[in-house]
Amino acid sequence: MNQTFRQSEPTARHTTVQGLDGQLVDAEADSLPEPQPPALRSQSARFVLGASLVLIAFNLRPLFSSLSVLLPEVMQETGLSTAGASLLTTLPVLCLGLFAPFAPKLAQRYGAERTLLGALFLLAVGTGLRGFGSVPLLFLATFMAGGAIAIGNVLLPGLVKRDFPDKAAIMTGLYTMALCAGAASAAGLTLPIEHHLTGSWSGALAAWAVPAMIVLMIWTPQALGSRRQASHSGFRVVGLWRDRLAWQITLLMGFQSALAYCVFGWLAPILRERGFDATTAGAIVSVSVMAQVVTCLAVPSFAVCCKDQRGVTVASVAAAVIALLGILFAPTSTVLFWAILQGIGQGGLIAVAMTIIVLRSPDSHVAAHLSGMAQGVGYVLAAFGPLVVGLIRGWTGGFAATAFLFVGLGLVAAVMGIGAGRALHVGARTVRIEGDS
């Protein structure tokens, strides 16, 4: 293939974000020809499409929080060590980083809809395989499902943005709420499912394959009926990996994600060690996760109105970390307050990190590559968070010493946020690939 490169004009020299859709980065921004939304014949078909995307988002988080509330039972009944449990909680986060870079290439080759269909299939199978109760199979199933979630994480926001450009704010809100609702539902309902329906931890984990199978059946005719259009990468971004600001954004993403997945993986065991029964601990985690919705929806619009995003980033970090310390050491009568504050702080931190990716990018192509860098590297770094929490628990016999980890993660996230929050653009440029393909 003979190719030449020329610098393209950025689509927006000074990127602005209108409303909540600023969080959504199109993973297929480099694809030529540009992917087109489906031609829908009726409003009902449009409704089904929107509902399908929201339901897919719902299924991208139960893998994490469903295991958390059952982790003591899994360890007791299988003989899994604390180190093994740490690896199990870390594995899906690691998959988010390892598999995210493959999503845009798969979408260019097979189409975003069909790629997402394959990811849903792997998610349903992986989640269902957890029902066999075998530790090796549990690791394999978690690896499969984690890889599928990584693909969904990357492709789904672009589909929401592409297919509903006139409803971007509403759809982004529904998408965000669905993500949180999936995590909260798994945290709050997995124990009742075990007690009243399945009678086993493995059955309760596998039960979350049911909503994945339902949305798989709904999505299959839409994905297979979509227009299949071969595409190739028509743009490339140069200078990103050598840019200091890009690395500050990436490290902000990594360390805030480490805090988030420490909460997903270990908050329920921390609460149970503090004396709460399993069902109550799961309910508190559920409330904390749903509290993220408030700031996930409010922070992006607020952040873009500020001169820069340093203040909101540091404030979100402070709230999330102080709340974790409260959960660890404050009287148990106040734990619900601290859990809600942690959700508010963590939700704000996630939202501002995603918004900063867009604000620091001069055009949509740089935003897509910066998002890929931040997710690919960031989630690999984030995987060490839940791993170290488990190792500290094994070494010390309790969770109190994890306070040092949470403070350390928060300090690094705050420092990176001060750098990433400056009103600058990353020093990368977009070039268009020309030539026969």
Image (cartoon, rainbow, N blue to C red):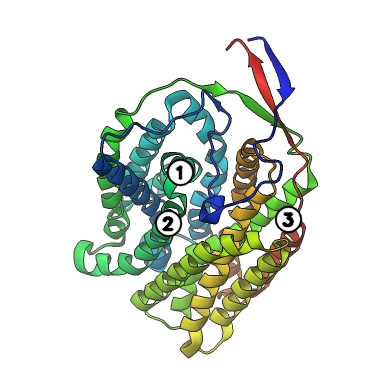
Residue 350 visible in the current orientation: no
135 relative to 303, above or below: above
Residue 80 image point, x, y percent: 44, 59
Task: Kindly identify which residue carries mark 3.
Answer: 420
Q: Residues within 10 Å of mark 2 (few under 14, many from 20)?
A: many
141 relative to 222, above or below: below
Task: Kindly identify which residue carries mark 2.
Answer: 179
Residue 222 visible in the current orientation: yes
Q: Dot 2: what SS?
A: helix
3 relative to 296, above or below: above
Q: Residues within 10 Å of mark 3 (few under 14, many from 20)?
A: many
Nearer mark to the viewer, of 2 and 1 = 1
Amino acid on which the number 1 mark rests in the picture: Pro
Residue drawn at point x = 56 percent, y = 74 percent:
397
Q: Dot 1: what SS?
A: helix
Task: Kindly identify which residue carries mark 1.
Answer: 165
Spatial CA distance of label 1 from label 3 is 28 Å
Spatial CA distance of label 2 from label 3 is 25 Å
Amino acid on which the number 3 mark rests in the picture: Ala
Nearer mark to the viewer, of 1 and 3 = 1
Judge by depth and name the residue closer to the eye, 222 or 263. 222
Q: Dot 3: what SS?
A: helix
Residue 275 image point, x, y percent: 43, 83
Judge by depth and name the residue closer to the eye, 400 or 135. 400
Direction from residue 159 to residue 243 in the image, left or right: right
